[in-house]
Image (cartoon, rainbow, N blue to C red):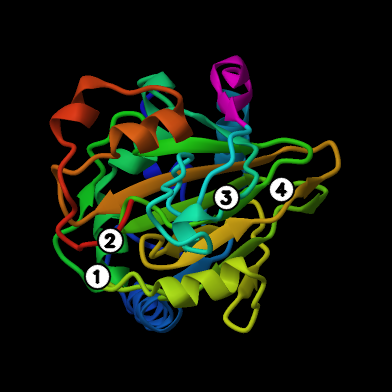
Amino acid sequence: MKKNLSNVVNLNKYPIGDLDSPKIKRIIESCRTELERDSCSVIPNFILPNSLDVMRKELEQQLDEVYMSKESVNAYLYSKDDPTLPKDHPKRIFMKRFNGYLNSDCFLENSEIKFLYKSEELLKFISACLGISPIYRWADPLACHAYNVMETDGILPWHFDSCEFTLSLMIQKPEKGGIFEYCPNIRVPGHEKFNDVKKVLDGDRSRVRQLDLNPGDLQMFKGRFTLHRVTKIIGQTSRYMCIPAYVLDPWRVNTPEHSKAIYGRVLPIHFERNKIRSDGLTD
């Protein structure tokens, strides 16, 4: 059966197919203000309950394909130490990580989230909310719309994303824990601000904000510039998120090191496109 956006997104509340409607214009303006101020904006109950159920079932049918990792990483998602740097440098501070991904290339062609990610309506809506055009779907074949799986005791430490803009769709919420924490706009293109990053890694919570997402919520997030993490999962219910990503550079993909550490595999495209980032920031 052919998929229809009206069966996935709550179009009655969020008519993303008509960006000129007064209702969606108000939503776009609110999201844009929050993204500029906080690097983060949430739209509650964006995905319909039936579609959430489809996404959860699709993921659970492929849980044996999820790449789980317990490797310690730094805030730039690298696991290798660099002894040429000072001992207390953020790149030398390693944190426990336990989570996994169902890579994007594992998804069936007719999967619910692949359909949503490929929809022009969603792309144009996100672009309007960001106030940036054009934006592109991520070219990384493993990471462009992966599922994030966090089981009991799962934890995702402080880190930056490789892509500029990430959506987080909460599919299943854990019994306890799994809270998203973030420090808005802690770095900017050309300026790593290592001192500010180190303060957070050392336990300073003056810049830390929390976000407790619920199933169906859509979070838009400037993850490349904002340090963020997910707290430990408590209880037997796993946390399921889908994380569709958008970029400014349609050519860019993850570095080979990043892809191996997070997604468990490296493809030829990761070597072919492994160039220094134009924004001057560490991946």
Sort mark 2 into few (<14), some (14-19) or many (20+) by Cα contacts within 10 Å.
Answer: some
Sequence order check, earlier mark of 4 and 1: 4
Crowd band around label 4 with a 10 angstrom C-alpha radius: few (<14), some (14–19), many (20+): some
- Give the amino acid type for the residue marked by disc 2 in the picture: Leu
- Could you tell me the amino acid type at mark 1? Pro
- Kindly state the secondary structure of the residue where label 2 is placed: loop
Question: What residue is shown at x 71% (from left), y 53% (from top)?
Answer: 178
- Location of mark 1 (residue): 189
Q: Residues within 10 Å of mark 3 (few under 14, many from 20)?
A: many
Foreground of the two, 66 or 46? 66
Q: Which residues are magenta?
A: 59-69
Q: Which residue is mark 2?
A: 281
Left or right: 136 with respect to 145? left
Q: Nearer the viewer, mark 3 or mark 1?
A: 3
> Residue at horizontal 43%, vertical 49%?
83
| Residue shown at the point (46%, 44%) measured from the top left | 81
What's under tag 3, amino acid-wise?
Answer: Phe
**Residue kind at label 4, given as amino acid type:** Lys
- Residue 202 placed where, x, y %? 63, 69
Q: Secondary structure at mark 3?
A: loop
Mark closer to the observer (3, 2) = 3
Can you tell which mark lies on residue 173?
A: 4
Measure the alpha-carbon separation of dots 3 and 1. Answer: 23 Å
Q: Distance of mark 4 from mark 3, alpha carbons?
A: 27 Å
At label 1, counting other C-alpha atoms closer than 10 Å, the crowd grade (few under 14, some 14-19, many 20 or more) is: few
Label 4: element kind: loop
How far apart are labels 4 and 1 at the CA level? 33 Å
Q: In screen coordinates, is 158 left or right of 212?
A: left
Q: Is residue 45 left or right of residue 90?
A: right
Asked if labels 2 and 3 touch by Cβ distance under 8 angstroms, the answer is no
Residues 45 and 90: in front is 90
| 65 is within the stretch colored magenta | yes
